[in-house]
Each structure stands twice: as C-alpha cells, then as structure tokens.
Amino acid sequence: MVQRQIVARGVKNRRVLLAMRTLPRHLFVPEAYSDYAYDDCPLPIGFGQTISQPFMVAYMLEALFLTGSEHVMEVGTGSGYQTALLSMLADTVVSIERIAPLALRAERLLHELNISNARIMIGDGYNGFSAGAPFDAILVSAAPTFVPPILAGQLNEDGGRMILPMGDFGAQSLVRITRNGDDLMVEDLMEVAFVPMIQGLSDLE
Ligand code: SAH
C-alpha cells in the first residue's frame, strides 16, 4: 500500500511513511471489508461515513508538517485511523466526532492499541475545542463550504496550520490555511471528494 499508492504518488515525509507502514489499517475497517483494507480507495465504516483512501490520509498528514512536538486537533474521527496516525506523528491529539457510536468505537480501538496521547470527544467540530486551544495543527476530514471561523481562531497564532477539504460535493478542494497573527494564508492543494461536515450532533445511536 505505502509503496504503490503513496510513495509512487509523491509523498516523501519519512515519519508519515513509517507510521503508515507500522499501523495495521485492517483493524479500522469493518470485518466485511477487511480484504480491501489496503486497497486504493475509501471504504464504508457505517453510519453513511467512510475511512479515507490511504493516499489521501498520507497526503493530508504530510501537508501538516508535523515534527512530533505538536498539539493537534482532528475533526471527524470516523474509524480513528487518522487519529492513530496523528498520535504517532504529534505530541497530543484531540479528535472530535459528531456520531457517538463511531467516536466510542474509535476510542475503544485506540485504547486496545495502547495509544495514550489521543483523546476522542463527541461533539460538533464547528465549535472546535476551546479548552484545548491553541492548536499547532488542525486536520479536518469532512468538508465544510467555508473556513469554520472558530477553528481558525483556535489555531496557534504563530504558524498554526489547518488542512481541510472545502466546498460542495463534486467541487471540493483540499486547502491549507496557515495562521500568522490575524493573517490567514490560504493555499489550494488539490481537488478532492469528502463527506460533508454537518452542523450539530448526530442522533444516531
Ligand atoms: N479520517 C477519518 C475519516 C472519517 S469520514 C477516518 O480515517 O476514518 C469524516 C467524519 O467526519 C465522519 O465520521 C463524520 O461523522 C464526521 N463529521 C462530519 N461533520 C462533523 C462535525 N461537524 N463534527 C465532527 N465530526 C464530523
């Protein structure tokens, strides 16, 4: 998976590649799909959501320039796969998920994997997590149609960066926002297709 899908498409960051070689992806995929866990595609994880394609996960992680010392927030825990990778690449991780059963499943799995520097919270990612701010990096894995202002406000003022897919389905770009003081620099990275970022908690149980 790493060689053919990720290195071949230009991801070079050694820490990202090592983390992805180390973490077993099949643990994060429903058993019915475990034969496809290392394939070049997103997969259903229940509740109408998907675990992102491995290349997309790698690309987003690389684009955050993590060195290991960062305090990171993730919006959209989903399976917990990217949360686990973030925990290997940063110092501390807070991950927010609006669908409670997904959050609880991911929390259980991270616990089984002895990951102790990542905390999963049930909540609406549009509100971020003010008690944990500022964040050196924010990774959003569902697509809003605008930059959520509260999230931008929770970025470290001194070079905090956020990667997020943005736009309506069929016309989304992956964007990197870098904050310096009140200035937000916006870079368009590539076209993508993510599930929408939905306001409010889900009532799915
Ligand atoms: N990185 C995840 C991808 C999950 S898909 C993985 O590797 O599995 C995106 C997730 O974002 C879904 O689980 C969805 O429920 C969640 N989501 C959508 N809108 C959200 C919001 N406002 N707050 C928190 N999570 C949200």
Image: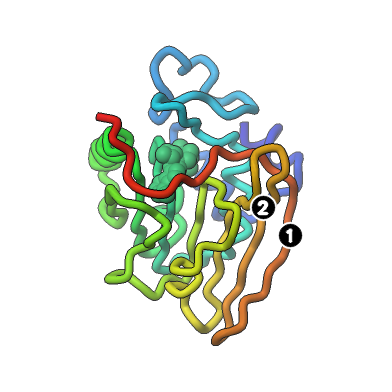
Question: Residue 113: image x %, image y %?
Answer: 29, 39
Q: Label 2, secondary structure: give it.
A: strand
Q: Between marks 2 and 1, how big is the CA–CA gap?
A: 6 Å
Classify the position of the C terminus by image quarter.
top left
State which tag comes first along the sequence, 2 or 1: 2
Q: Regarding ligand 1, which quadrant of the image does it lie in?
A: top left
| Left or right side of 178 for 35 | left
Q: Name the amino acid type tagged 1.
A: Asp
Whether residue 22 appears in this view of the structure is no
Q: Position of residue 149 (x, y in %)?
A: 50, 68
Q: Is residue 110 depicted above or below 69 in this figure?
A: above
Residue 107, image quadrant: top left
Q: Residues within 10 Å of mark 1 (few under 14, many from 20)?
A: some
Q: Can residue 118 be seen in this view?
A: yes
CB at mark 1 closer than 8 A to ligand 1? no
Q: Which residue position is annotated with label 2?
A: 174
* Residue where numbered disc 1 is placed: 188
- Would residue 141 be found to the left or right of residue 75 on screen? right
Say if mark 2 contacts mark 1, CB within 8 Å.
Answer: yes
Residue drawn where x is 34% and y is 58% of the image: 94
Asked which secondary structure carries label 1, the reply is strand
Picture quarter with the N terminus: top right
* Viewer-closest of 185 and 55: 185
